[in-house]
Image (cartoon, coloured by chain):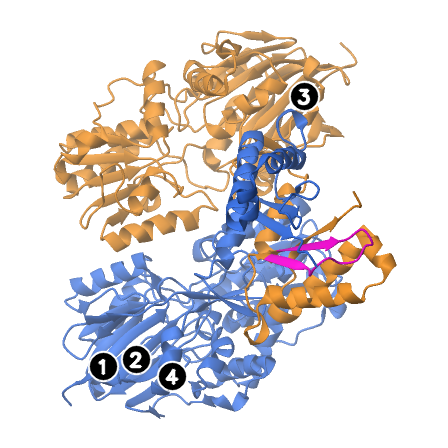
Chain colours: A orange, B blue
């Protein structure tokens, strides 16, 4: 077996929260057979990725080595784990394995993208084993905030790996199987765990995590106390929470209406996959309009203040005939993800203007996280007793803290970020390579590399505005007519109220009139000179240096 | 006195946190003499105001009625209260009154802007009175997070108003005068308070506020425990915190170096104004380089992750010869303002990559807020016993909650947002007018109205990208040469790898070749037709509809 090695290479999700994509390999150096665990997206923001629809991991390396790839495993159906699958699968075309609910969601995505649904295979929990080259993979149910989340037990000739996926330690998660200490101990007892790749999201949360069941009563009491219409939001995929909310509504004699495409899709998928039973009957928005407000509860998308989601639509007025009014209640049964604060507060303040009472999670009363907190992570370390711990699913600060904790417990650990290939064949992780990784933007229907300059140009236009200069030269390189300037995203007037474009045009025309033949004949130099004038005028007149496009048209003798 | 009325009109700061500007008026309807309290800025963000330098209140109404304006009062030197003064004063040109430290900061701004410094007048605390038309105004020291913050006691023939300014209830604020219950009771005893205009920032913080002194010992202990270099950040204007940090450094045998222009400016201003004594001697960055790491502490700007501030500079590598290393400590003696999370975390993760230990405020151990929490607000209500409470300095949700609390205590109250003019002559506030207000952007050196479309164009370019089309027509309206397309912020290639610009040019040229004389002669219709083609091609090829600029050049017979 000498010369064979076991490698681990995150392509996304390690050093960030989002777009998870982890590669494992086993075999001779450079010829390892590979599997991919998860293929998720991250979400764009105006600061770094304006106009972008989704952020996908750059899987260039994997695509180049696709002949070595055996299979793809998806731990659960959250977008940051499955969201890129339909977009990038055409570059990989390998079988995809997942549990039933996850596969259901995946197949919906494949269907929409016109991809073969039979590429997705349903796997039952351990003891079922998927063989993929030198890898033997089992799905182990874990509790999280979506049905049928799984950890993976990955057996290789070099040892056993546990890939935690996203998990929390909840024995009573309302929907689906709970976390089971005995199962985890059994895994470690069966074969020692060489490496635990472990969720790090909540490593800074110092208290023990609480079960999904702990919020059932507070939510029930809250909804019972309401007198007007109640609207609640949470992540659509948190089917357990949807159930808790809907049951609380029924207990308060309220009909339940689900608003938002994702919400209905998730409930349907969960019912189809058989993970959700006894969800209260829901009514349509048309029916809801006819129900007295104190007998109605809406469960809506948009817990993060997303502009097009149902909550934001309601905050702007009537939506599907429904409208919030003074005395209604809006419940955020959710936490604001860092970076979304402004969007959420926009919605909150809009509801405040309507006289709606807003109830937030109140420090955990109406929301619990789906990730293991620090004591729970430490507990998991003790259950699996791995030789080494490699934290994943975290920003650098999370990974660093998670390794620190492992070291304190005497476990070898390493911070392995996207693009770092480590060899875990030995007793401790060893960095063996650095792979070029990064982000690919789904922009409309195009895939754009983060380094292509497309997004950089957008950001520059947004920061600096844009000026477009058109100049026409005749067959003798003489200016024909005057320079023309169009401005976009720039103050229209400069000092003393002069129109900025006219000031630029005057300076450009004056320059052209005085320019020598040689300069006028040289596209590059002329472009540069005109650009400089535009920027200089803008600087003087409005104190900004815009982006400039110069179009020089030359009439050729026909 | 009949026919005279007392009015209140917020132009900024009511319904948002930032750009405070409050107008009071007294006199016959429409002829009230006016005073302005505060003239602050808000800070731009990429989502709503890309490229903008500062956001100023729209003072159009006040400028139109400037002949009725008597004076401007500035409660304290935070940017959201004084930041717009130098930019907008040229439209007002009225005397400005402030306490010494505030006036010092104001004069620095006037000096930089080339405005007359003698427009700023130093006012001593009550009992000194400034007479401004029918108003008699006194400054009352309150504790906050900047030296010499003041509430205003505004006496009018219709009654006494207390304008709280930003305040907390801290009897021992380390620098400057503490909050004094007896003083406040004295104000109410002297003359009943008709209306209390009150800070609402922390109305959702349910515990009683803590004194600045409570963090001195934890900070001292923390810094004493550090082995490498310590770097701490807080708001530059929080002079008390700077003192606490510097003294903790000295107690741990560390030299103190201030990094960041604002930091040094504030300490100097505080010393000049006589509010800061005994600040430890500081060393320069050049000197700091020579000091052993364990004997050095830097106090730096950039608690909100601002890209150009010292903390962000250090997170990117060497700054002024100084560099963070493994084992150093970085202390955020500050809270992240909602909306700044991403910027702060970018800095945190960069430090994490360097192996720096990051310490945040840890739920208040190393930071206390400068605003009154709910119990402190309720306490202030009881001290002043106003007939009515008008909350300010808050988003709508804060104002609403603050009014709710007032009502619970039996005090009349109203949510009065920017642009709402209320008459407070009677027993309860009465809305009498709505004034057009909004935001003015300082963009480079230009003032741009929020509704001018300039920023909207920038956002659209950032979201959609931009295409520029150039077409030349001859004297007979015949196309001369082919259409030319320049793209910016758009994927370069469409379906099947075809260059997007070329596909557009081909379609445009084909269209022009087949277009009728009438269309070719009509600029507007031709522009519209070409624009439609470009957007259609983009939609087909890359799934996006870009912003389009069409330049049609017509050669005229000479």
- Check chain identity for marks 1 and 2: say if they share one: yes
Q: Position of residue A520 (x, y in %)?
A: 82, 57
The residue mark sitting in front, 2 or 4, is 4
Discs 1 and 4 lie in a common subunit: yes
Q: CA distance from mark 1 to mark 2?
A: 7 Å
Crowd band around label 1 with a 10 angstrom C-alpha radius: few (<14), some (14–19), many (20+): many
Q: Answer whether labels 1 and 2 touch (C-beta < 8 Å).
A: yes
**Residue visible at 43% across and 75% down in the picture:** B39
- Please tell me whether residue A397 is drawn above or below residue A490 in the rendered image: above
The foreground one among A387 and A93 is A93
Q: How far apart are the alpha carbons under marks 2 and 4? A: 13 Å
Give SS at disc 1: strand
SS of the residue at dot 3? helix
- On whether residue A556 falls in the magenta region, the answer is no
Q: Residue B96: name its quadrant.
A: bottom left
Q: Earlier in the sequence, mark 2 or mark 4?
A: 2
Residue located beneath label 1 in the image: B6
Task: Looking at the image, tell me whether mark 1 or mark 2 is earlier in sequence order.
Answer: 1
Start-end of magenta stretch = A467-486
Residue A484 located within the stretch drawn in magenta: yes
Q: Which residue is identified by label 2?
A: B24
Q: Where is residue A444? Give x, y as percent.
A: 53, 34
Circles 3 and 2, Cβ within 8 Å, touching? The answer is: no
Q: Nearer the viewer, residue B172 or B19?
A: B19
- Please state which of the two labelled residues, at mark 1 or mark 4, is closer to the viewer: 4
**Would you say residue B25 is visible in this rendering?**
yes
Q: Determine which of the numbered discs, if any, sits on residue B66 in the image.
A: 4
């Amino acid at each position: 077996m000498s010369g064979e090695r076991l490698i681990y290479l995150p392509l996304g999700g390690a050093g960030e929260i989002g777009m998870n994509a982890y590669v494992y390999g086993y075999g001779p150096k450079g010829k390892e057979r590979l599997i991919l665990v998860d293929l998720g997206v991250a979400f764009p923001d105006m600061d770094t990725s304006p106009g972008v629809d989704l952020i996908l991991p750059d899987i260039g390396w994997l695509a180049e080595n696709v002949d070595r790839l055996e299979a793809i495993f998806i731990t659960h159906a959250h977008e940051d784990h499955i969201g890129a699958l339909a977009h990038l699968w055409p570059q990989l075309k390998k079988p995809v394995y997942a549990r039933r609910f996850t596969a259901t969601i995946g197949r919906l995505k494949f269907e929409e993208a016109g991809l073969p649904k039979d590429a997705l295979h349903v796997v039952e929990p351990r003891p079922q084993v998927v063989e993929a080259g030198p890898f033997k993979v089992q799905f182990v149910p874990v509790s999280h905030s979506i049905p049928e989340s799984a950890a993976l037990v990955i057996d290789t000739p070099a040892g056993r790996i546990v890939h935690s996926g996203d998990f929390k330690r909840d024995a009573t998660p309302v929907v689906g199987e709970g976390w089971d200490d005995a199962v985890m101990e059994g895994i470690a007892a069966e074969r020692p765990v060489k490496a635990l790749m472990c969720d790090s999201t909540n490593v800074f949360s110092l208290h023990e995590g609480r079960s999904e069941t702990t919020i059932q009563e507070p939510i029930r009491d809250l909804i019972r106390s309401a007198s007007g219409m109640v609207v609640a939001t949470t992540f659509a995929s948190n089917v357990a929470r949807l159930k808790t909310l809907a049951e609380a509504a029924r207990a308060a004699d309220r009909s339940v209406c689900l608003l938002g495409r994702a919400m209905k899709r998730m409930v349907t998928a969960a019912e189809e996959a058989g993970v959700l039973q006894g969800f209260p009957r829901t009514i349509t928005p048309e029916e809801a309009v006819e129900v007295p407000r104190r007998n109605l509860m809406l469960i809506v998308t948009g817990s993060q203040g997303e502009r097009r989601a149902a909550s934001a639509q309601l905050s702007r007025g009537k939506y599907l005939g429904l409208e919030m009014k003074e005395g209604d209640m809006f419940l955020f049964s959710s936490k604001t993800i860092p970076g979304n604060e402004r969007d959420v507060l926009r919605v909150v303040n809009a509801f405040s203007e309507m006289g709606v009472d807003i109830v937030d999670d109140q420090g955990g009363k109406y929301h619990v996280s789906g990730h293991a907190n620090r004591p729970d992570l430490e507990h998991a370390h003790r259950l699996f007793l791995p030789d080494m711990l490699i934290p994943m699913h975290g920003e650098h600060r999370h990974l660093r803290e998670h390794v620190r904790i492992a070291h304190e417990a005497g476990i070898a650990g390493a911070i392995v970020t996207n693009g770092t290939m480590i060899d875990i064949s030995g007793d401790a992780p060893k960095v063996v390579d650095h792979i070029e990784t990064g982000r690919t933007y789904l922009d409309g229907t195009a895939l754009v590399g983060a380094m292509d300059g497309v997004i950089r140009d957008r950001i520059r236009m947004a920061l600096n505005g844009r000026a477009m200069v058109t100049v026409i030269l005749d067959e003798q390189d003489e200016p024909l007519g005057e320079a023309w300037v169009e401005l976009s995203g720039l103050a229209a007037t400069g000092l003393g109220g002069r129109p900025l474009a006219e000031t630029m045009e005057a300076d450009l025309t004056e320059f052209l009139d005085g320019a020598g033949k040689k300069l006028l004949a040289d596209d590059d130099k002329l472009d540069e000179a005109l650009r400089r004038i535009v920027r200089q005028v803008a600087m003087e007149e409005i104190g900004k240096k815009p982006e400039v496009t110069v179009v020089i048209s030359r009439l050729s003798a026909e």
